[in-house]
Amino acid sequence: MKDKVVVITGATSGIGKALAYEFARHGSKVVIGARRHELLIEVAEDIKLKGGDVAFAKMDVSIEADCKNLIFTAVEQFGKIDVLINNAGISMRARFEDVDLKVIKKLMDVNFRGTVYCTKYALPHLLKEKGSVVGISSIAGLKGLPGRTGYSASKFAMKGFMECLRIENLKKGLHVLMAYPGFTSSNIRNSSLTADGSRQGESPRDEQKMMSAEEVATHIYRAVKRHRNSLVLTSQGKLTVFLNKFFPNWMDKMVYREMAKEPDSPFK
């Protein structure tokens, strides 16, 4: 991956930040995008101090023009794009019957439409380089999670979009990877939206027992390098996907029970 140009959204925290460091460490030129300008500068400067080559653009993936500008920045700075990693995302925690519909819209705008916008503008450059487009999904994109209706819906939509993209470009050399991390230690639960759209503020789960964002990034780096189509992470995530193939009704009950264990769970 040395000298490959890698564009990463949501790159100032969690998996996105870890991916920026991981690819830079292996000699890739990274282009990072996120909403918080001061954190973008902080990450970019740190990567430079470590000897990496980096560019950045302040952007909100739910805004089409911002996505276009991120891709323009990458091409202007480095002349090409080899890898696009659609990582930016938000979650939620509320029963659908209680949730304000603006929350569902927000999740679809960020998690799904953000992926569509960035991929649309990056695609001509990726096809030219026979590059890779990556979607950072979740086990919630393979098995619906109660209390995360908007999150699961957006990740299932991402899966369908990326699968179509792969098939459409079978003869053009485009590599498409869908990554499905399990519960990962990151800030996504802290910033999850509640029923009224406000931020949750703290994680309802024990973050210390989860796979680290850095470990997830290492797995994703290897999957991109090896041109894998799918990557399911954590033993719990793999077990969930496996059992759901054969015992979907039983898994519905198990997933409900697991979500009900969370502090202040909407399910009892």
Image (spheres, rainbow, N blue to C red):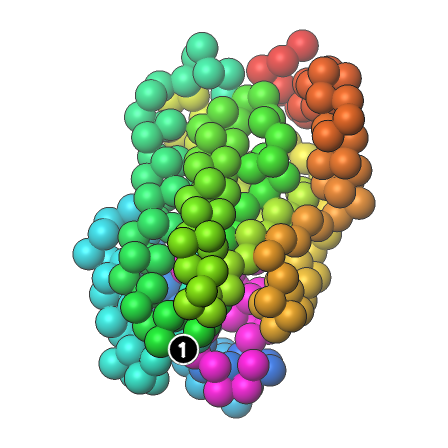
Q: Position of residue 183 (x, y in %)?
A: 67, 42
Residue 19: within the magenta?
yes
The reply to whether residue 2 is in sight is: yes
Image-based side of 28 in relation to 40, left or right: right
Name the residue beneath numbered marker 1.
129
| Quarter of the image that includes the C terminus | top right
Dividing the picture into quadrants, the one containing residue 248 is top right
The reply to whether residue 184 is in sight is: no
Magenta residues (range): 1-23
Image-based side of 185 in relation to 95, left or right: right
Looking at numbered disc 1 in the image, what kind of residue is underneath it? Glu
Report the residue that reaches farthest toward the left.
Answer: 65
Q: Give the residue at x 27% y 62%.
A: 121
Q: Position of residue 247 (x, y in %)?
A: 77, 22
Q: Position of residue 267 (x, y in %)?
A: 63, 13
Image-based side of 247 in relation to 145, left or right: right
Q: Give the residue at x 38% y 70%.
A: 126
Q: Give the residue at x 41% y 18%.
A: 99
> Compared with residue 55, is residue 231 higher up or lower down, i.e. above or below?
above
Dividing the picture into quadrants, the one containing residue 238 is top right
> Compared with residue 157, is residue 251 higher up or lower down, i.e. above or below?
above
Q: Give the residue at x 77% y 36%.
A: 242
Label 1 packing within 10 angstroms: few (<14), some (14-19), many (20+): some
Task: Find numbered disc 1 in the image and state the secondary structure of the residue it sits on.
Answer: helix
